[in-house]
Image: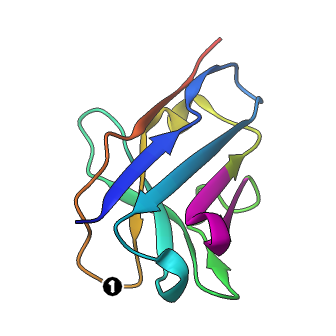
Amino acid sequence: QVQLVESGGGLVQPGGSLRLSCTASGTRIVIYTMGWYRQAPGKQRELVAEVTSGRTNYPDSVKGRFTISRDNAKNTVYLQMNSLKPEDTAVYYCNVAGGRIPWPWGQGTQVTVSS
């Protein structure tokens, strides 16, 4: 069974940066489009970044501020988040993307942007 473990979240001031990591076990991510998702209190989970072998995609809300990358050898996906805003506060998860049925969700990592 696939297991996903996210880390790297924390409390940061507006304008700050964080780098999230997600390591998968039970599968090799190299063949999959992978994504980072977030869920804020009272809101639906949303996709904020996805990466295939050679392309990335972002919604307008994070474009230019977030960068997704992957290290297939380490079976790990990263999310570099810069210029963070209070509205980026959420629990962040990684999972398969590209229209595939999600694997079991990990515990996520909390990102709080506040002064």
Whether residue 71 is visible? no
Point out residue 64 in the picture as x, y percentages from the top left corner: 76, 60
For this view, does 37 lie left or right of residue 72?
A: left
Which image quarter holds the C terminus? top right
How many marks can you see? Answer: 1
Q: Amino acid at mark 1?
A: Gly
Q: Secondary structure at mark 1?
A: loop
- The image shows residue 35, relative to residue 5, as above or below, that is below
Residue at image x 55%, y 31%?
9
For this view, does 5 lie left or right of residue 107?
A: right
Q: Quadrant of residue 96?
A: bottom left
Q: Quadrant of residue 2?
A: bottom left
Residue at image x 76%, y 29%?
16
Residue at image x 65%, y 71%?
73
Q: Residue furthest top?
A: 115
For this view, does 23 lie left or right of residue 107?
A: right
Task: Determine crowd level at label 1: few under 14, some 14-19, many 20+ residues with C-alpha closer than 10 A.
Answer: few
Q: Which residue is mark 1?
A: 99
- The image shows residue 25, relative to residue 45, as above or below, that is below
Which image quarter holds the N terminus? bottom left
Q: Which residues are magenta?
A: 66-79
For this view, does 63 lie left or right of residue 97?
A: right
Seen from the viewer's position, the closer of residues 33 and 16 is: 33
Seen from the viewer's position, the closer of residues 51 and 40 is: 51
Residue at image x 40%, y 76%?
97
